[in-house]
Amino acid sequence: MADSARARVRKKTMRTNYRKRVSFARGAAFLLIAALCAALAVPGTARAGRAVRLALQWYPQAQFAGYYMALEKGLYAERGLYVTILPGSANNNSLSRVVDGRADFCTAFLSSALEYRDKGEELVNVGQFVRKSALMLVARKDSGIKSVKDLDGRRIGTWGDNFQLQPVALFKRENLDVTLVRQSPSFELFMRGGLDAAMAMWYNEYHRLISYGLNPEEMTAFFFSDLDLNQPEDGLYCLESTLEMWPGMAAAMVEASAEGWRYAFAHPEETVDVILRVMKKANVRANRAHQAWMLARMKDIILPDGAKDIDTRLRQADYERTRDALRSSGVIENDIPYNDFHKEAAR
Amino acid sequence: MKVHGIAFRLASLTLLVSSLILASIVGYNYTVSRSIIMDQAEDRGTLLARATSSRISNVLTSVRKVADAVSFSLEDGSLSEKRLNDLGNHIISDNPEIFGTAIAFEPYAFKADQEYYAPYHYRSQNRIAFTRLGGPDYQYFYMDWYQLPRELDRPVWTEPYFDEGGGHQLMSTYSVPFHRKRFDEKTLAGVVTADISLGWIKTMLSDLSEREAGYVFMLSRYGTFLAHPDADLVQNETIFSWAETLGRADIRELGRRMVAGESGIEEVDGLPLTGDSFLYFTSLPDQQWSIGVVFPKEAMFADVFRLNREVATLGILGFIALALLIIYLATRITRPLCNLTSSANEMASGNLDADVPVAASRDEVGELTASFLTMRESLKGYIANLTETTAAKERIESELRIAHDIQMGILPKLFPAFPERKEFDVYASIEPAKEVGGDLYDFFFLDDDHFCFLVGDVSGKGVPAAFFMAVTKTLLKVVAERDFDPGVVLAKVNDDLAEDNEACMFVTLFLAVIDIDSGETRYASAGHNPPLLLPADGPCEWVPPLNELVAGVMEGTSYTTKTMRMNPGDTLFIYTDGVTEAMDKDNNLYSEDRLMEEVNQCGGRSAESIIRTVAASIKAFTGGAEQSDDITMLAMQYLGSRKTNKEKHDGNND
């Protein structure tokens, strides 16, 4: 199959395996440039620095604004970390990059990380950023869906298995008989009425629907975090060996990243500019409205319920609820103790 | 004064009205040309949007027909693998606009042992290439191009996408589900697709945009920019995210109308690139893509603005020319008027020989100047005439004055008249009215013992009266010195006066002759007012009137001579009717009663004193009212004969 078809294949695959795989696509060149940037950021400093590779679980976007701003503002360099950010893609799972040694740190969903850990990888959570799940179900009001009960007997679009934990738990709990249809990331099936409801991330796909011309008042939104099915999402992970070999490095990473997030929330305009610049450089489709929305929603889920400051601890209750849900649905087998999994790095 | 002159008012009024007319012409012109342009732009925009959409639709429809036909032929379940491949090849070779075509089957639907079966033919470097789609890494069942027609069970046009392998061309796929009989039931067997490059659309639209003042853009079914002059928008933004970035709810609403498949025209202000603009939009019904044509108002109305600017400029130039002309004309008209005004002012100050501007023009001003000249000549003539008349009148008046002086001069004026005579005391006064009047008095000795005194009043006034009076006085003196009898004197004088008296003038006379030795007084009266006799002891009394005719009227009239005796100290007061008929301001007469009363107060006084007292009384009565007649009074006071006086004197000495 030739050029265009191949390209399409690749692209469509990426979308299907949405934020699941780790990337190495633009590795070398980007790494070099980023290393150069990092080196330039602290010229002539006598302090011994360490090159650190941070893998993200998806393409550059405001979902990772904190890390980009920490890099942009030299917050990593201040702590002697010469960070290279490795953007993810459909073919580049951030966790496998860390496991394979192609990255030192990565961002990942708690559930994804637990899956890897369950397989025996020595991954640990060193800091938790997203405390509130952004996963949601969206329905069009004109389909008659006003409450969770109305989902009974409907066709619902889902992504891969990993994202089905919360919805499946919901349908089971509410005793709803639904047809799950795997949806492509374009949301076309939903938009054309082929689905009654679709899964979406609040900071991403929900806004995409708004950008498709649907007004918020025309949609019914169910947040899993509101339905007692909250799961922490983006966190920072590394190998236990890394933690042992360079004590303090993880703490510096978490602290600088948290600082980066604070900066991003305080300077949304500048942050969106930086993100758009990075996205254009990476040749990723970008629009300002979308990234501004995403940054605002990241603030909502990193600082949920009016929290004043970023808390990078993974709360034990959150952890255990997620772990038990994964176990009961058979995604993981082992009962991984909280203290083995979460190593509180930041002081 | 100058600023509100005719020139100023004429110019400002005319210019005000003409500027109003100018403004309304420009305004009307602007409105009409603007609405014409708007109508044209509306037609043009709508036409452009429709023509573009139908051009695109035509191509897409032809592709759709091919795919529809293929899907129909695929209903035949007996198609071999080779026939399927040939079909794919034919589709590509026969339809230059189709870039690639896939015939994708449901899992295990073509071959029972193959989950994925999807031969794909496509163009590559001027030949037709072939591959098979599907596998664990490419689960086409979940791709839009397969899933949408499958789930919706109807043909679909997918959202256009950029094909990274095909030279960054905008592509769209038309996918048609096809069915086969399975277990006696028609079930979905797969999907046939036709990939079409939309690169030509972009080229077509940018060509159009270059030709037009505005631009043409295209939106996908969900509002994604498929073509737009701002390359950053294309495939990155939907019209909705763009509206959000711009903070424009109206653009979002417009986007919703566009993706809903509406056609229409909207005014959109403040668009990036074009500013205030008109948007014409329509949709491609099959794909639900939208075509928008944006015309910037500024460019649309540029011609209108230019036209109006030119009209306004011409108007202003015309206005200035008109202003200059009006000022010139007004000045030309008013300058002679101003000159005339200053001439008139000079003339008014007395210089009748002031320069009058020459009436060159044959208009109202010329006529005015001519009339002015005529007026000046008439004035000059009138003034000359007046001067002459005045001179004549002054001469006459001065002559009259002289005549009056002469008239007065013939009356005895020297008092005491006879200082050596102790027998009597005579005093007379005449207060002439303004005009020359005809009163007279006289007294003279006829011989040593006989003293004649008289008062007369000629009818009428003026020179004839004066002459008549002079004649009368002369006659009286001549006749009285010959005849001592007053009645005879009056009769003779009457005869003389009546002779040749064609003017029928007459005179009243009271003439008395006193024998100054005895005090015996003879008198006659020709219609004169009765005099008053003021005895030395006792109240005064009227001398009884004789009721005889005035003198000078009838020849042959005889007058009676009466005799009375005046005792020493008696005074005879004779007057003319100017005394009793003197009037105050309310036209009341002084009257005889008042005279009598006044004279009664004068017992024992001298003749002069009596007359002065009465004169003062009259003056007080009239209070300065204008005198209408001569006031003449004569008082004759008998003091006794020389003999008696001597006796008395002697006796006193004894």
Image (tube, rainbow, N blue to C red):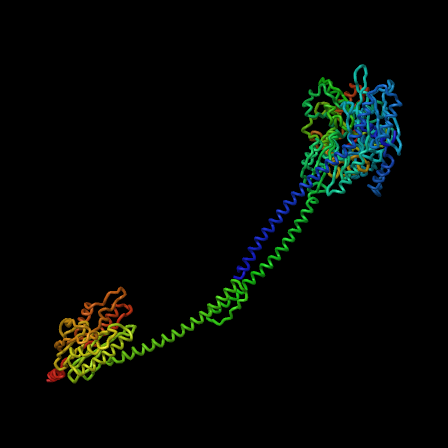
Residue at 26% across, 64% down: B586
The extreme top residue here reads: B183
> Is residue A289 placed above or below B333 in the rendered structure?
above
Camera-side residue: B100 or B270? B100
Q: Position of residue B426 (x, y in %)?
A: 20, 79
> Is residue B78 placed above or below B321 in the rendered structure?
above
Lateral position of residue B92 relative to residue A138, left or right: right
Query: Quadrant location of residue B109?
Result: top right
Query: Quadrant location of residue A7?
Result: top right
Q: Is residue A40 visible?
A: yes
Camera-side residue: A256 or B597? B597
> Is residue B579 placed above or below A99 in the rendered structure?
below
Q: Position of residue A192 (x, y in %)?
A: 74, 26
Lateral position of residue B258 relative to residue B81, left or right: left
Lateral position of residue A55 relative to residue B390, left or right: right
Image quarter (top left, top right, bottom left or bottom right) of the C terminus of chain B: bottom left
Q: Position of residue B85 (x, y in %)?
A: 88, 25
Q: Position of residue A133 (x, y in %)?
A: 74, 27
Task: Report the number of numbered marks.
Answer: 0
Camera-side residue: A237 or A144? A144
Q: Is residue A274 visible?
A: no
Query: Quadrant location of residue B171?
Result: top right
